[in-house]
Image (tube, helix red, strand yellow):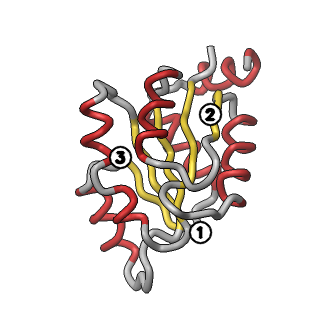
Amino acid sequence: MPRTVILGVIGSDAHVVGITILEQALSSAGFEVINLGVQTSQDEFVSAAKSHDAEAVLVSSLYGHARQDCEGLHEELDAAGLDVLTYVGGNLAVGQNDFEDTRETFREMGFDRVFDAETDPEEAIAKLRSDLQLTTTEAEQIKVDG
């Protein structure tokens, strides 16, 4: 049975190319992807994760205001009783000089994984498989069955 992930661009961001590439890569890897599209609110992420019994929420942002857009997301997920992996990626901060500082900021906000805009989708998928504790055999079976 395919593992379900929620994907979307948070806040006022309207950049669609990254999530389109991610959706295709995740689908090809055997995941069921619920793509919320662009300009997605925190409430929409939480509602989709709950209604689809998702195992992960993947948040994309390219316009540099992800910190403001993601503030409080984990509290909303907790309030909804959801225990999901959370990933965030893209160009997360305006004038970002040291991505390690940005990564630490988002880790402190509760994100399990933080990726920059240069991350290859296959790297994120490998981390997702690892974090979901999918064995190679299970991951291959999902791809065949999915």
Residue topped by disc 1 = 118
Can you say whether 27 is above or below 70 in the image? above
Q: Nearer the viewer, residue 28 or 7?
A: 7
Identified at 53% across, 72% down, the residue is: 63
Give the camera-side residue of 111 and 73. 73
* Relative to 65, 25 lies left or right: right
Closer to the eye: label 2 or 1: 2
Name the amino acid, label 3.
Answer: Asp
The numbered mark, 2 or 1, whose residue comes first in the sequence reads: 2
Please tell me which residue is depicted at 37% across the width and 56% down the height of the picture: 70
Can you identify the residue that label 2 sits on? 34
Please provide percent x and percent y for residue 116.
50, 66
Q: Nearer the viewer, residue 44 or 102?
A: 44
- Marks 2 and 1 sit apart, C-alpha to C-alpha, by 23 Å
Judged by depth in the image, the label closer to the viewer, 3 or 2, is 2
Numbered label attached to residue 66: none
